[in-house]
Every structure is written in C-alpha cells, then in structure tokens.
Image (cartoon, grey):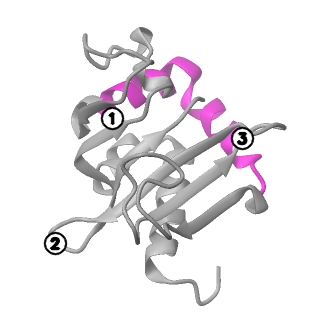
Amino acid sequence: MADEPADMARARQFWKTLAKGDTDALKTFYAPKIVLKAGSELLKPRWGLTKQADRSKDLLVDRDDLLRGYGRMINGIGKEKWSQVFARIKKDKIHVSTAGKNDQPFAGIKLGDTILKVATGPGDDTLCFILRKDKDGKLRVHLESTDY
C-alpha cells in the first residue's frame, strides 16, 4: 500500500513470504520464540512440533521447530498448491493494524504491536499474526493464531 508505515509494510511482506511457502525466508520474520495460541493448526500432533503440543493450550515454541512444522505442512499439501490457495485471497481480506490496548484481541498482545489478520473463509475464519519489535528494533512475529 502506498505511503503505508514501515511496520505495516513489513507485516504484508511477511504474509507474501508465508503465502509463497518459503520457509527459509520466513526465518527472518519470526522471533526466536513464538507463542502459538490455543487452537492453532501447528499444535496438531500430525505436524510433530513438540510432544507438549495440545490444541487447548497456548505453547511457546522455538522458531526452528515452528518452521519445521510449517515445512511438514507445506510439503504435505505441496508448495505449488499452498501458493495457489493463498494467491486467491483478495487484498481486501488482508488487514494490518496497530494494537490499541494490551491483550486485545487476545491475551499476549501489547499496545503498539502490529496485527496482521487474513480472512481465509466465507465466515469468520482468520489467520492472525502479531508482530513486535525485538531488542534490535526488528519487527518479528511473536504470536500467531492460525487454523489453516
């Protein structure tokens, strides 16, 4: 988007990278530790994230473990098909905003975080990624709530 703040532009670049299924490039977008919110897809045992994975609870995971899980998911679907599915999502279904208060829309969000929400279905199906500046000032995903 023209004249969009840098944080919002970075969130959109993250989305484009995820939509392509480029797990190598995704590494630069994720914090070293990420909170997967309860209900997230990668908490399903089939993705082999960790033995502690339980879809009823949030889980703090290492970036490399998360990306291995994404790799299994993307390769299971097929990278080309993964990309095609996400290429069909219209731009008006991709929303980037700034958190106006702590713990909204869910626990763990901090005032000023960048929120990327992508509507994926006809109902209220959404993917939600919370980006926050790290100690070096780089905006990275710290939380995600996804059900692919």
Where residue 85 appears, as percent x and y from the top left, is 70, 37
| Residue that carries the numbered disc 2 in the rendered image | 136
- Label 1 amino acid? Leu
Q: Main secondary structure of the magenta part?
A: helix
| Residue that carries the numbered disc 1 in the rendered image | 67
Task: First in sequence, mark 2 or 1: give its number.
Answer: 1
Q: Nearer the viewer, mark 3 or mark 1?
A: 3
Where residue 115 appears, as percent x and y from the top left, is 51, 60
Residue lying at 33% horizontally and 63% vertically, measured from the top left: 132
Q: Looking at the rendered structure, which numbered label has been put on residue 32?
A: none
- Label 2 amino acid? Asp
**Local SS, label 3:** loop
Task: Using a 10 Å C-alpha cutoff, classify the residue at mark 3 as few (fewer than 14 neighbours), some (14 to 19) or many (20 or more).
Answer: some
Task: First in sequence, mark 2 or 3: give its number.
Answer: 3
Whole-angstrom CA distance, mark 2 to mark 1, is 22 Å
Residue lying at 49% horizontally and 38% vertically, measured from the top left: 145
Task: First in sequence, mark 3 or 1: give its number.
Answer: 1
Q: Which residues are magenta?
A: 66-90
- Label 3 amino acid? Thr
Whole-angstrom CA distance, mark 3 to mark 1, is 21 Å
| Residue that carries the numbered disc 3 in the rendered image | 120
